[in-house]
Each structure stands twice: as C-alpha cells, then as structure tokens.
Image: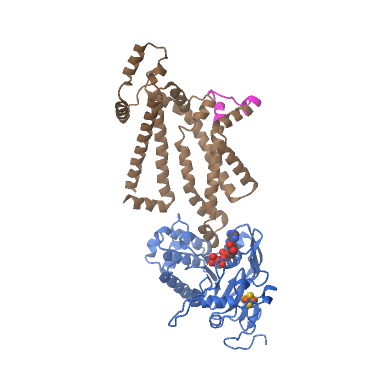
Amino acid sequence: MLRFFFLRLGRAALTVALVVTFAFVVLRLSGDPALIIMSVDAPPEAIAAFRKAWGLDDPIWLQYLRYFSAIGQGELGQSMRDGRPALELVAERIPATLALTLPALALKLGIGIPAGIYASLHRDSLIDRIVMVTAVAGFTVPSFVLGLVLVLIFSVQLGWLPSGGQESWRHAILPVLTLGIGGAAVLARFTRSAMLEVLGQSYIRTASAKGVPWPAVVRGHALPNAAVPTVTIVGFMVGSLIAGAVVVESVFSWPGVGRLLVVSVANRDLAIVQCILLLVAITMVSANLIVDLLYGVLDPRLRSGAKAGAH
Amino acid sequence: MSTVLDRFGTVADPLVEINGLTVAFDGVKVLHGIDLSVARGEAVGLVGESGCGKSVTWLAALGLLPKKASVSGNVRLGSTELIDAEPDVLDTVRGGRIAMIFQDPASALNPVLRLGKQVGEALALHGGLSGAAIRAEARRLFDLVGIPDAARRLDAFPHELSGGQNQRVMIAMALAGKPDLLVADEPTTALDATIQAQILELLTKIRRETDMALVLISHDLGVISQTCDRVCVMYAGRIIETAEAQSLFDTPLHPYTQGLIAALPPLEGVRRRLDPIEGNVPEPWNLPPGCAFAPRCPRRGEACDAGVPPLAWKAPGRFAACIKALQAEPVRPREPVYA
Ligand SMILES: Nc1ncnc2c1ncn2[C@@H]1O[C@H](COP(=O)(O)OP(=O)(O)OP(=O)(O)O)[C@@H](O)[C@H]1O
Ligand code: SF4
Ligand SMILES: [Mg+2]
C-alpha cells in the first residue's frame, strides 16, 4: 500500500512537471512579453534592458532550466508588471475564487447526486426525464451563456440580484448558480448511469433473493458500488476548484484567480500565468491522487490490484 | 425420495404450486402457462435449451423480474400467494422459505462487501441473529459447505476466492435462512468439471441432511440425472415433458426429450454417436402456429401445426406435450392412480 502511494505520488509530481513545461514552452513561443509589457513604441534601449533584466535573450533551454530550478526552490518569480512576487498576487485571489467554487461544489454534490440516484430508481418517470433533459442542457450549454441568461432574468428583468462585482454575498449568488447548475446536471447524469449499471448487476438480484428489503438493497448494495465511478467525476470537480471559474469570473467581473489568469495572459505576464498554471496543476493532480487512493478504499478489487501492480 | 404425480400432474401436498404462470416482456410472451409443483424434500430438475424460460419461471415466482415484465398466474407457497404479493411478504419468503442461487457466482456476490457480511445479512434477516452470533453461525455454514479456513474467508472479498469457492459461499448464504426450497439456477455451469461434481455432491449432501427441497435448473440432462428425483423438460416457454428421472431417461416420450438424451455423451463403456438436435429454438416472438418443436421434430406430421399440444397424461406419473406420444409404454407398469 505504501509503495503504491509513493508510486502514485511520483507520477503526480511528474504530471505537474509536464504541465509546467508545457506551459513554459507554449507561453514563450506565443509572443514576446517585452513587446507587450512595454508599449510597442517604447525606445529600443528600454526594451533591450527589460529583456536583459528578465533573461529573455538567453537561449530557451537556459530560461527553462533557470525557471525550473527556481520553482524547485519555491521561487515563482515576480510579476513583470508591478514587480510583486507572483505567488503573493495569486494567493490574494484564491479566497475570492473559493468563495464561488466551494458553494458551487456543495450545490453540485447536494443536488446532482440525490437527483441522479432518484432518477435511476424511478427510471422513465417524470422526474427522471426532467433530470435527463436538464442534464443534457447543463452539459451542452456553455457556462457563459448560462451566466448571461441568469443575468438577463434575475438582474435585468426582475432586478433581484446584482449582475457583477463582489460587494456582498448577494453578488455571489448568480455566479455560484451558474457554476453549480451545470455541474449538478453533469453529476446527476453520471450518478444515474453509474446506479443503473450497478442495479442491473447480478449481485443486486442476489441481495433481493435473500430477502433484503429494497431500500436496504439500494443503500447497502447498490450505492457502495455506484460510488466508485461517481468518485471519479467528483474528484475532477474538486480538482477544478481553482481553475473551474475562469469563464464565470469574467462574466460576473469577480476578482478571482480566473480573472487574474485572463488578464495576465493578455498582458503576457509570464510569471503570474506560470504560477497559476502550477497551482492549477497541483490541485488537479492532488485531487486525482486522492481519487486513486479512494478507489482502493471503496473497491477491494482495486486495492489488491494495486498491491499486485506494485510488487 | 420419489414423488408420484397425480393425473393432473400435481404432487400430493405440494410445498410450492405454480399454476398457469405466464410472463411477457414488452408484449412478447416468453412463458406460456407453466404448471409445476414441488413436494417437500423433493429434488426436481428443470432442463431445456438456453432461452426456454427456466430462469424466468423462478425469477417470476419470487418477484425478482424487472418491472417491465408482466407476470400472471399463481404461485402458492402453502397458503401464501406470491404473485403480486406485498414487498414485505416477498422479503420474508425470499431467502427464508425459498432461496435461490445463480449461475455465475463471481458476479452474483457483491464485490465490495466481505463474504461474512453478505452471509451475515441473511442470518440477521431470517435467523434473528445479531453480533457475535452471526459470525459464529456464518462460520459454521462455511464449514458446512466445505470452505477451508472458514474463519479467515469470512473477511475475504469475492474476488479473492475461486468460482467454486464462491458458489459454496452462495450456497452457505442460501442455507442461512433455513429455506424449505432451494432453487439452484445453473449452479455449476460457470465451473469446470471437477468443481461441478463437487458442488452437485454438496447439494445432494445438504438435501440429505436438511430435508430441503431442491429445484435444479440446468441445460445439462447429465447434471440433472445425478441429482434429481423428477425432471421437467422445458421448450420455448412451456413444460413439454415431466416424469420421474429414471423413467424419463429410460423411455423419453417427447421427441425433444429423446433428442436431448441422444445428445448426451455416453456415461460408461459403449461409445455412442452424439446426436445433437438440429436447428434452433424459435424466437419467442416468432413461434410456430402449433407445436413449438415442430420445425425440428423428426416425427412431425400435419396435425402438429393445428394447435399447441397440451401437457397430457400419458402413463402413470408421465406427462408429455406431443400428439404422437400417445402409444408410449410405461416403464414400470403400475395401476393408473385414477383407475
Ligand atoms: N430481463 C429480460 N428482458 C427481456 N427478455 C428477457 C429477460 N429475461 C429473460 N428474457 C427472455 O425470456 C426468455 C426466457 O429466458 P430465461 O432466462 O428464462 O431462459 P433460460 O431457460 O434460463 O436460459 P439459459 O439457459 O440461457 O439461462 C428468453 O427468450 C429471454 O430472452
Ligand atoms: S406434436 Fe408433432 S411436432 Fe410436436 S413434438 Fe410431437 S410429433 Fe413433434
Ligand atoms: Mg437461465
């Protein structure tokens, strides 16, 4: 088990390294930060000095090595715009993002899972149909469209809620709904299909055949099995707690990490972009790691499979 | 023990009596009125090719079919009617009075629950046991069905055991409620030959020791012959022949049964050519107008298409659904019971 854990940990670290490398390459190839950060008509000497200061004239592999060893020492660089440490700038924004994504996650779990279970148990009922239609809609409608529709209804038409900004908790309602509805729909669909798959299995019939009352069959036999695939998608949702709000933060001008990312990309503020990507990669990979370990807890077959794999 | 059928094809004082059981899926009938009774302590074999309705018969009797199945007819256990019974009635019958085990033990056991818990659940439901008593009794059952190292196996998961071991667990689970009848639906089909023989032996031993009735479902007459007193042969959703096992093997009356027996590998000595019945079972939505076996029947005549031959008395204790099986000689001549 321990060996399995370290193997997974190593793989997680490798994934983060790959993401960071990828981000580095793409960012350096996609434009010259000096030209964007200094205005285009800045004097050539100023641009040259900027390039020298940030090491932009060095060969790309040298920049890469330098960047990587800096990360290794926990040094994530400074914003090219205002010179403050990138990590500090990003960390400032995390609470605002979590203020949207955590309630949204609660909404997804609180609505999506029960709705999916209910739909699977009452297959083809009215509620099942509603869940399925909503799920398909939630799956296909992009979040900025949903956000705009909600703004149109609740801000413009009804005037109940503010359409943007971060002044009070009321400002969070629409963005949280925008994030939560789609996710709840996706989760409901996954839970439903996981449950249907499990309910069709022979061991469910065995449980009924030995006289277990149906509610106990669902609770004691179906749910523990359906939890395995459901955990995957929940893990993905937890992994996107930081990165999942980019679009919604922009639509609702919410000053979180996502908006900082959009602005920094536009500005070619490489240190910040890289810092955010690193953070995102770490959350994703950690969520993945937790999911992997949870698999082992939930499904004994995977537990011993992992053991066998590690020997 | 051998049980004589009266002239209506019913055992005296039946434990379970099925009358006119029909099942349809999405409007397609797959069971066309099954009449079948099982006496206390009797071992009945239910045999027939894949898809003839063996499993559906007993799943319907226990209310275990999916909702889309429409079931009619009667299944009586003593004075209790099981068709359309309330859930709590079914829950006490299932596992408590009639237990059922299935073909593929690996998928019939819950993969994420420990075996001891799965067996213990039945003990808690039907034995009124709790706590340490459950574990002790589960252990006794594991010993009874011949699972080595029982104490440790209680904490194992299904994937850690072989198919044969898992089927033993299923049997232990079925015995937990001390049922009057065990329905074993192809309990050995997924297992290899040696294990198959061991499981059949185990079932026979348990029956001897507990006086529990057994319905053994199989498409293998050989398996049935080793284990059962009486045999019901099914074809396309109907019982087409029923008789005591020995007479059925000695003088099969229905051409389908004759075909099944001809297809059996010889048990000992004499080499015999294997004669599998040609053709396929008709689809339930595309049955012939008369006898369902007609398209494959070597003795088919024009009259066979006129109507479905009923399961009729042919000789004492012998019933067949074939219009040409009239002249059959009873194996052990005996005074007809109604004479
Ligand atoms: N859940 C279901 N939905 C639709 N049709 C079904 C269902 N279960 C069984 N059937 C149909 O009912 C008929 C009888 O099936 P059943 O499972 O009883 O056959 P069987 O005699 O047990 O065969 P096997 O030896 O393959 O187990 C078949 O035609 C089958 O396709
Ligand atoms: S009724 Fe006719 S077709 Fe059917 S089994 Fe008898 S002889 Fe064959
Ligand atoms: Mg079957």
Image quadrant in which you'd find residue B15: bottom right
Count of residue discs: 0
Where in the figure is residue B35, as x and y percent of width and height? 64, 72
Q: Nearer the viewer, residue B141 or A165?
A: A165
Where in the figure is residue B162, as x and y percent of width and height? 40, 63
Q: Is A158 on the left or on the right of A253, as rendered?
A: right
The chain letter of the blue chain reads B
Image quadrant in which you'd find residue A291: top left
The reply to whether the magenta stretch includes residue A156 is yes
Q: Nearer the viewer, residue A162 or B151?
A: A162
Q: Identify the residue shown where x is 38% and y is 63%.
A: B151
Q: Identify the residue shown where x is 61% and y is 81%.
A: B318
Q: Is residue B29 above or below residue A249?
A: below
Identify the residue at the far top of this view: A43
Q: Is residue B223 above or below residue A221?
A: below
Where in the figure is residue B170, as x and y percent of width and height? 47, 64
Instruction: Identify the colour of chain A in the image.
Output: brown
The reply to whether the magenta stretch includes residue B87 is no
**Chain part drawn in magenta:** A154-175
Q: Identify the residue shown where x is 35% and y is 24%.
A: A77
Viewer can see residue B181: yes
The colour scheme used to paint the residues is: by chain
Q: Identify the residue shown where x is 59% and y is 47%.
A: A119
Q: Nearer the viewer, residue B287 or B52?
A: B287
Viewer can see residue B43: no
Q: Is residue B221 above or below residue B120?
A: below
Q: Quarter containing ligand 1? A: bottom right
Where in the figure is residue B29, as x and y percent of width and height? 65, 64
Identify the residue at the far right of this view: B306
Quadrant where the C terminus of chain B lies?
bottom right
Q: Is residue B249 above or below residue B114?
A: below
